[in-house]
């Protein structure tokens, strides 16, 4: 990454693409999963995510796996690929695509709060304002549908539970953002699909129709595979809190798609929500964080580039692009724009 390119802007771009990939899936899962069991739906979504890892568009880079990563991987597989999609599928069958999409706004709030509690990531007034605006965008839409016939309290609580599980998943996966994203997607998808397939068999869920199964697999490849790869890349660049806050665009994308598919009863709410989300996204994309700070001497292994202002060690032969290997940093004090990445986990 060039020293002239903002790390926050680079991370925001990846987070936004992740939100777009995930956001379109909620109304599609609601449509194609209506006659499919929730565990079977979750299994198909993460089988699709795992299969998407077979497509490698770039050379992989990541720190080596360690034993301490295994419990995190097990946790994100259980929470993010097991509990969350099962609750989402069950809830969508009782609320519909529009309401379900809107409720996904809770994931951003849970993620920002958990990132602050677990890692003390600095939020600041700008990020807090952006999250507030995005939340208001979801509220503007939700107020219009809360009294519609499609509203279901149990369904809403199930989706809220799914967002909490994904918030925990996002917090746990922060420490895995230095691994090759493709490997994380493959392992999480395979474990999650295996777990939910076993659950579907134990609970006697019927096999889905071929059309529904194919549609859910494709939703999983895009909204749960590609989206996760982009999400982890964003976390690597800008931390969990900011990534989770930008990811709050996803519910709006889902609601907009549901609107385009014919659910147009809440046109005014969609327009108002668009204004809120656009303002919140602008705050993120134009964020700058700069101050004097100190890096203590450290030896570690993580993906890095030699044009990022922190890695000036030599290779024989010279290496260009992102790569990973053990390396040493001398103590340095400087002032530049940065994000809460692996080198900037300092207090404020």
Image (cartoon, grey):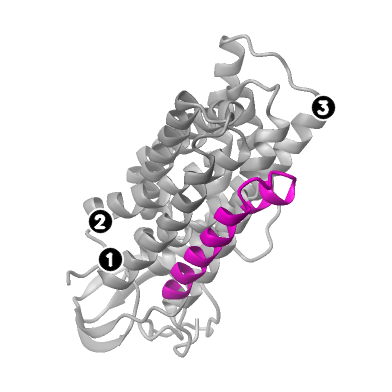
Which residue is at a point 46% across and 82% down the rendered structure image?
315
Mark sitting on residue 123: 1
Which class describes the residues within 10 Å of circle 1: few (<14), some (14-19), or many (20+)?
some
Circle 1 or circle 3, nearest the eye: 1
Tell me whether the residue at label 2 lies in contact with that at label 1, contact meaning CB atoms closer than 8 angstroms.
Answer: yes
Cα gap from disc 2 to disc 3, whole angstroms: 43 Å
Which residue is at a point 55% across and 39% down the rendered structure image?
99
Could you tell whether 179 is left or right of 342 in the image? right
| Residue 73 quadrant | top left
- The secondary structure that most of the magenta stretch takes on is helix
Cα gap from disc 2 to disc 1, whole angstroms: 8 Å
In magenta segment, residue 19: no
Asked whether 62 or 110 is in front, the reply is 110
Pick whichever of labels 2 and 3 is earlier in the sequence: 2
Mark sitting on residue 210: 3
Asked whether 98 or 346 is in front, the reply is 98
Mark sitting on residue 116: 2
The image shows residue 160, relative to residue 287, as above or below, that is above
Local secondary structure at mark 3: helix
Cα gap from disc 1 to disc 3, whole angstroms: 46 Å
Q: How many marks?
A: 3
Q: Position of residue 108 (x, y in %)?
A: 41, 52
The image shows residue 233, relative to residue 210, as above or below, that is below
Q: Position of residue 12 (x, y in %)?
A: 48, 70
Pick whichever of labels 2 and 1 is earlier in the sequence: 2
Stretch in magenta? 256-284
In magenta segment, residue 260: yes
């Amino acid at each position: 990454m060039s020293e002239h390119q903002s790390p926050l802007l680079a991370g925001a771009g990846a987070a936004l693409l992740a939100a777009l990939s995930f956001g379109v899936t909620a109304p599609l899962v609601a449509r194609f999963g209506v006659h499919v069991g929730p565990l079977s739906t979750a299994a198909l979504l993460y089988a699709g995510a795992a299969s998407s890892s077979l497509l490698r568009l770039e050379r992989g880079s990541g720190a080596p796996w360690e034993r301490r990563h295994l419990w995190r991987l097990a946790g994100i597989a259980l929470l993010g690929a097991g509990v969350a999609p099962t609750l989402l599928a069950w809830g969508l069958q009782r609320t519909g695509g529009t309401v379900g999409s809107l409720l996904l706004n809770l994931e951003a709030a849970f993620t920002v709060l958990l990132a602050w509690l677990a890692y003390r990531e600095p939020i600041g007034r700008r990020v807090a304002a952006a999250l507030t605006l995005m939340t208001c965008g979801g509220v503007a839409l939700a107020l219009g549908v809360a009294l519609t016939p499609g509203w279901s309290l149990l369904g809403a609580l199930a989706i809220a539970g799914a967002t909490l599980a994904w918030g925990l998943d996002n917090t746990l996966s922060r420490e895995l953002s230095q691994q090759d994203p493709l490997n994380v997607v493959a392992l999480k998808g395979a474990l999650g699909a295996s777990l939910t397939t076993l659950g579907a068999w134990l609970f006697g869920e019927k096999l889905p129709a071929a059309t529904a199964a194919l549609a859910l697999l494709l939703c999983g490849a895009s909204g749960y595979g590609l989206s996760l790869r982009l999400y982890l890349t964003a976390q690597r660049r800008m931390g969990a809190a900011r990534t989770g806050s930008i990811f709050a665009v996803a519910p709006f994308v889902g609601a907009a798609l549901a609107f385009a598919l014919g659910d147009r009863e809440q046109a005014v709410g969609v327009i108002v929500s668009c204004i809120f989300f656009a303002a919140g996204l602008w705050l993120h994309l134009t964020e700058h964080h700069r101050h004097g700070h100190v890096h203590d001497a450290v030896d570690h292994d993580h993906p890095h580039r030699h044009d990022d202002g922190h890695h000036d060690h030599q290779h024989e032969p010279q290496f260009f692009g992102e790569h990973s290997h053990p390396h040493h940093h001398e103590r340095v004090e400087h002032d530049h724009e940065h994000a809460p990445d692996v080198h900037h986990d300092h207090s404020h």
